[in-house]
Amino acid sequence: MTIPNFLIDQHVHSSYSPDSNSTLEELVRYALALGKPAIVTTDHLEYDCKYFKQDVHIDWKSYHREVEELLLRYPMEIRKGIEVGFRSDYKDVINEYLAQREFDVILLSAHNDGYLDFSEKAYHDLPIQQRLKHYFMQVREAVDQMDNYDIVAHLDYVTRYTTYPVDEEDIVACKPVLYDILKLIIEKEKVLELNTTGLYRQGWIHPHPYILDMYVNLGGRAVSIGSDAHQVGDVEQGFAEAIEMLHSVGIREVVQFKGRAPYLVSI
């Protein structure tokens, strides 16, 4: 499966996130080697991050300085994105932060509920249905309460970290809340991400094929592809499989963003 040159990975972390060691220059050089016209980084914004036990912010002063230096040395467009870890108790602070800055694309995620990160073992010691339904309720809250975002990232993120495999019947049992989430995405004209990291965790691309089929059956067509790369060599990993998956449900275009304006790329 050929990956189009104009298809840009819209979920990439650089060393401006605390969980990545890949520099912005390394990402630029890698994208050039792939023949890409642009890159976008989507580093983390997360207040009271339970994983890192602190607020996670991008050092924008250093970021802008480095971007200016790189633009002088490389024929590459560098787009500015961000991944927002939503919590309802920080909604106003998040919106204020986003309103003060300009972005090309904003991802929306749910990583913790104010008590536990959804990757923590203590969370996954809970019964599977309690875990999944609680997590999806957090996602529904994020999608509903936020307006200033473009893409809903890794919708079934919680399944990456389960102690035991999650079966399709576990996903199906969450149909009512998943229906609400997908209808909100469509009604608010947001974009559903296919996040390929899942291939290398639980064996499927986020979201689970059952969820993607539900989205398409509800009339959803707007999708994005992101690798969720935290090291340079993982950029675009699994993209061939993601394109094949989209073809299987009749989707042959993906949505990309520049200056928050959507445009379509054929796949």
Image (cartoon, rainbow, N blue to C red):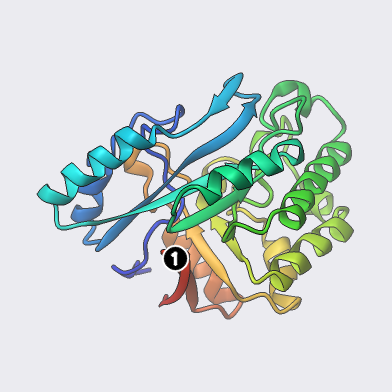
- Please give the name of the residue rendered at 33% of the width and 70% of the height, measured from the top-left corner: 4
On the question of residue 189 being in view, the answer is yes
**Quarter of the image holding residue 250?**
bottom right
Q: Is residue 184 left or right of residue 194?
A: right
Image location of residue 153, percent across then percent down: 59, 52
- Please give the name of the residue rendered at 40% of the width and 56% of the height, measured from the top-left corner: 9
Q: Residue furthest left?
A: 73
Image location of residue 30, percent across then percent down: 24, 48
**Quarter of the image holding residue 264?**
bottom left
- Please give the name of the residue rendered at 44% of the width and 65% of the height, measured from the top-left corner: 257
Between residue 241 and residue 62, name the one nearer to us. Answer: 62
Residue carrying label 1 = 257
In the displayed structure, 216 sits above or below 150; it is below
Image location of residue 121, percent across then percent down: 71, 22
Number of labelled discs? 1
On the question of residue 26 being in view, the answer is no
In the displayed structure, 37 sits above or below 221; it is above
Q: Secondary structure at mark 1?
A: strand
User: What is the three-letter code of the residue carrying label 1?
Assistant: Phe
